Amino acid sequence: MLHDLLIAPFTEFEFMRRALAGSVALSLGAGPVGVFLMLRRMSLVGDAMAHAVLPGAAIGYLAAGLSLGWMTFGGLAAGVIVALLAGVVTRTTHLREDASLAAFYLISLALGVTLVSLRGSNLDLLHVLFGTVLALDDPTLLLIASIASVSLVTLALIYRPLVLECVDPGFLRSISPAGGPTHIVFLILVVLNLVGGFHALGTLLAVGLMMLPAIAARFWTQDISLLVAVATLIGIGSGIAGLLVSFHAGLPAGPAIILAAGAAYLLSLAFGIQGGLLTRLIPRRHLEA
Amino acid sequence: MSAAIRFHDLTLGYDRHPVIHHLDGAVRRGSLTAVVGPNGAGKSTLLKGIVGTLKPLQGKVTVEAGRQHVAWLPQAADVDRSFPINVYDLVSMGLLRGSGLFGGIGRRDRHRIEEAVAAVGLTGFEDRAIGTLSGGQMQRALFARLLLQDAQVILLDEPLTAIDAKTAADLLALVRRWHSEERTVVAVLHDLDTVRSMFPETLLVAREAVAWGATGEVLTAENLLRARRMLEAPDRSAETCARAA
């Protein structure tokens, strides 16, 4: 019974195994990136960047149809351009980064939807917006896995300046000029993971697997290394749970994965040992010291 | 006089509005200087100019030994206390200039971190998240980070604000130790009694230098009154400064 419920869908159907591999790879890259986005108080920046990727992917689609390479390159280029433009505006005017990003991503999103509607059918638009996690081919899987690998290695390299930029940016500026470049590299990682994510989940949901596990993890630990690990595990768990629910209930897989991550967040909010609602409602006896 | 820091017609500010302007002079090497003045006088801005995180609107500031030999204690409010990092990791950041942002921390470094934590009386707190520390404990941790930086020029921005008398005494003992080691210390302070009792030299600012020299000669009633009167809010309709280059 349990085997049929939990294991059989993956052993019997290749498309489910591919979807699982894609979700795991996405979680490995996007989970840690999401943790740093949250800790830098940039949770909604991920959402903005996910929308910013759309016009690039649309231009890639207009140029070559549903081509992995063109849509990836287009999405990546659009995301990086929006991130850099927002960065330049933030550093040269009095606008804060969230405001300049909001301006550019809204322009981007409107442009993207217009471009897709110029040529595509509604089905194509749905593909770009909501992804095709149950139809991941070898090149797409390789792309997502490569992005996860690049993300983990890059995060390891920029870990210290990234942490310092969050905790004490003034101190980092006083000892090193690495703050600015680190911020740009980090934003490029965000874009890379969103581009990987939009092939599986679409632009609108890609940010879900990045942010929801990270925010849920905050309710379980105060240690940054553990935060990264817990967020990644929640992402992987959401992938598995979402795919199974989608398989058995006949629901669309992408939204089911994000809903599973949403459920993980709500459970963490209720039962998390670090500031969850239950610990506040039923406080435990205090310690001696 | 051998100078550690020189100001050449230095004007610092934001959006063309000077916060402190046309400052000339030098901080003597090995000196212990207090920077005092009313709120908004430009004290913290001056330290940001020295450390290089704020570019001058005009003129320049020179650190003779080079900026890599400057350690800066920012105001405690500038540190994000909600970030999930413990005392040990916060203190270890003091090694980054020496080890580089990507270098490892070896056994000798770990010993130095433990010594710095012990010197500020935080042994046993190494694993505590910084968000759980009191204001005084947090300031002790930031002083431990300063100790590890082992810098020739040390800038302290309101190091004694909102901490108890015992912590203040312990931290001032560290300042005395740095002074005895002939390091140059510049501290922004509000408590004039502490300044009079411990700091031989004082710079009184109110958007420009009001007085600078021996503390007894600077902190006169007349100078302090002048400083209060000179402090004006930035004027949105201000004309271009006649001395602007």
Image (spheres, coloured by chain):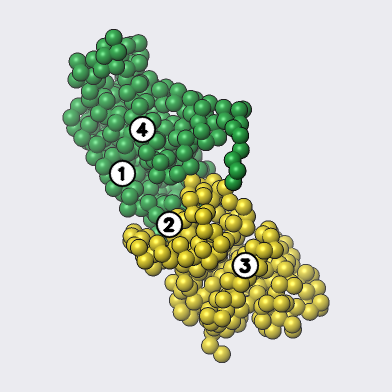
Chain colours: A green, B yellow
Residue at (32% x, 23% y) in the render: A240
Tell me the distance, in whole angstroms, between the alpha carbons under discs 4 and 2: 29 Å
| Mark 4 / mark 2, whichever is N-terminal | 2
Tell me the distance, in whole angstroms, between the alpha carbons under discs 1 and 3: 44 Å
Tell me the distance, in whole angstroms, between the alpha carbons under discs 4 and 1: 16 Å
Could you classify mark 1 by the number of other residues whose Cα lies within 10 Å: few (under 14), some (14-19), or many (20 or more)? many
Indicate the quadrant where residue B96 lies: bottom left
Indicate the quadrant where residue B200 lies: bottom right
Say if residue B120 shows up in the picture: yes
Q: Which labelled disc corresponds to residue A151?
A: 1
Could you tell me the amino acid type at mark 3? Answer: Asp
- On the image, numbered disc 2 is attached to which residue? A179
Could you tell me the amino acid type at mark 1? Answer: Ser
Q: Which labelled disc corresponds to residue B109?
A: none
4 vs 2, front mark: 4
Q: Position of residue B116 (x, y in %)?
A: 49, 65
Q: Is circle 4 on the same chain as circle 1?
A: yes
Say if residue A135 shows up in the picture: no
SS category of the residue bearing label 3: helix
Circles 3 and 2 in contact, beta carbons < 8 Å: no
- On the image, numbered disc 3 is attached to which residue? B170
Residue at (59% x, 40% y) in the render: A287
- On the image, numbered disc 4 is attached to which residue? A233
| Mark 2 / mark 1, whichever is N-terminal | 1
Q: Is circle 2 on the same chain as circle 1?
A: yes
- Host chain of mark 1: A
4 vs 3, front mark: 3
Q: Position of residue A213 (x, y in %)?
A: 42, 32
